[in-house]
Amino acid sequence: MSMSMRNTSQRREQILELLVKHGAVQVAELVPKLGVSAVTIRTDLGALESQGLVTRSYGGARLTRTPPTEQNIHQKDNINTALKEHIGTAAAKLVEPGDNIIIDSGTTTQHMARHLRGLDRVTVMTNGLNIAWELADVPGLTLMLTGGQLRKESLSIQGVQAEACLDAYSFDKLFLGVDGLDLQFGATTHHEAEASLNARMVARAKKVIVLTDASKFGRVSLHRIVMLDRVHAVVTDESISAEYREGLQRMGIELIIAA
């Protein structure tokens, strides 16, 4: 990732933080605060508007919906634990003998990894240290880790090395965790490097399976991973709304409700 791309991402996250705090921002106020031109700020606001997070107004923008705040992996592990266990159990049943799969880092995918025993000739690539720990001693399973830089908040490995090591392989299935899933704006996550790596995972997999509890539906985080037309299945819980149940099925996405 170039320095300019990183700066752009950090600036947009700053603008989003100001919007969450104040509800609205003015271009004229942001120019001296962020040290960039009005044209650049307007481009940033346009990008945030395309994600459905803000609505442009004369001279500025107001917050349309609040993106979820990021929590570290230990905090996440204590949220909706029973639901994640059910979702993980249901997702593990989608793995078949002989499969080559990617399991994305995360707490819901970690619950899935705990149920991958008794399968023959399964190869798992993961960018999650927590996932690798769960699978390290599983018989009949070949475990591969991406290279790259560890992000301690999420115990995920990411970056240029992580993305490059995926390119040599083709996978049957990707099991993907998300921070938000919206019918219009797709699957999103908090962190730019994770979104970039997840998008590369999507490109290398024949089938994309999203694991998410129903609280993530209708949420949009800053960085898009993929639009839903590239998603084949969603594994979620019984509290999914009628709107999302019908919306996903209308898009031809297989819906698996974990009991």
Image (cartoon, rainbow, N blue to C red):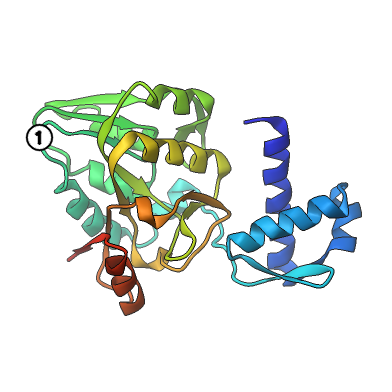
Identified at 46% across, 55% down, the residue is 179
For the residue pair 228 and 108, the one nearer the viewer reads as 228
Front residue of this view, candidates 156 and 57: 57
Q: State the image quarter where residue 118 is shown.
A: top left
Coordinates of residue 43 in the picture (x, y in percent) = 75, 54
Q: Which of the 4 image quadrants contains residue 131?
A: top left
User: Looking at the image, is 18 positioned above or below residue 232?
Assistant: below
Provide residue 175's location: percent of width, then percent of height.
30, 44
Q: Is residue 142 left or right of residue 22?
A: left
Residue at image coords 27%, 32%: 171
Residue 187 appears anywhere in the view: yes
Instruction: Return the residue at label 1.
Output: 97
Q: Give the class, few, some or many, for how many residues have Cα within 10 Å of label 1's Cα (few <14, many ≥20).
A: few
Q: Vertical placement of 162 versus 112: above or below?
A: above
SS of the residue at dot 1? loop
231 or 188: nearer the viewer: 231
Q: Is residue 134 left or right of residue 27?
A: left
Query: x, y (%) of residue 72?
Result: 50, 48
Give the camera-side residue of 38 and 122. 38
Q: Is residue 25 left or right of residue 192?
A: right
Q: Is residue 236 left or right of residue 190?
A: left
Which amino acid type is shown beneath numbered disc 1?
A: Pro
**Quarter of the image that includes the N terminus:** top right
Q: Quadrant of the C terminus?
A: bottom left
